[in-house]
Amino acid sequence: MHAVTTSKTELELGAKLGAIIQDSDAREKLIENPADVLGGLGANSEVVIHADTADKVHLVVPAEVDLSKVQSEDDAYFEELGLAALGSCFYEDLPE
């Protein structure tokens, strides 16, 4: 993976999405109708939303993988892939 510069616009969009996700009513609207919510933010509205629940966590598969780092068993790269795949998935109370 490589370093990516985050623009002010992307940071603002991220802050708006973070606020939506933390508000239960707004989160539900995003899940039910992502095109309207994302379009209203000026974001690409042609995305598929997969909402994690206590019983289901979605794993994101990166679009590109550096095979040379995989073949060399680069632990730091594996950690980076894991963080990218799981994003901010964290549950204090895991389902039984």
Image (cartoon, grey):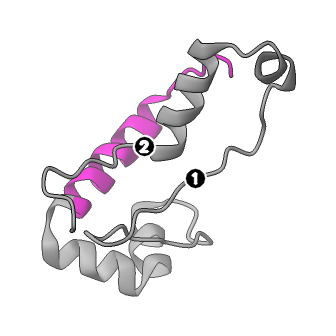
Q: Which residue is mark 1?
A: 60
When the figure is inspected, residue 62 is found, relative to residue 68, above or below; the finding is below
Which residue occupies 60% across, 22% down? 4
The percent position of residue 28, horizontal first and vertical second, equals 26, 80
Left-right relation of 23 to 70: left
> Taken as a whole, is the magenta stretch helix, strand or loop?
helix
User: What amino acid type is highlighted by mark number 2?
Assistant: Gly
Label 1 vs label 2: CA separation? Answer: 8 Å
| Total marks in image | 2
Q: Nearer the viewer, residue 66 or 2?
A: 66
Which residue occupies 53% across, 55% down? 59
Q: Secondary structure at mark 1?
A: loop
Q: Which residues are magenta?
A: 1-21
Q: Nearer the viewer, residue 10 or 80?
A: 80
5 in the magenta segment: yes
Q: Which residue is mark 2?
A: 87
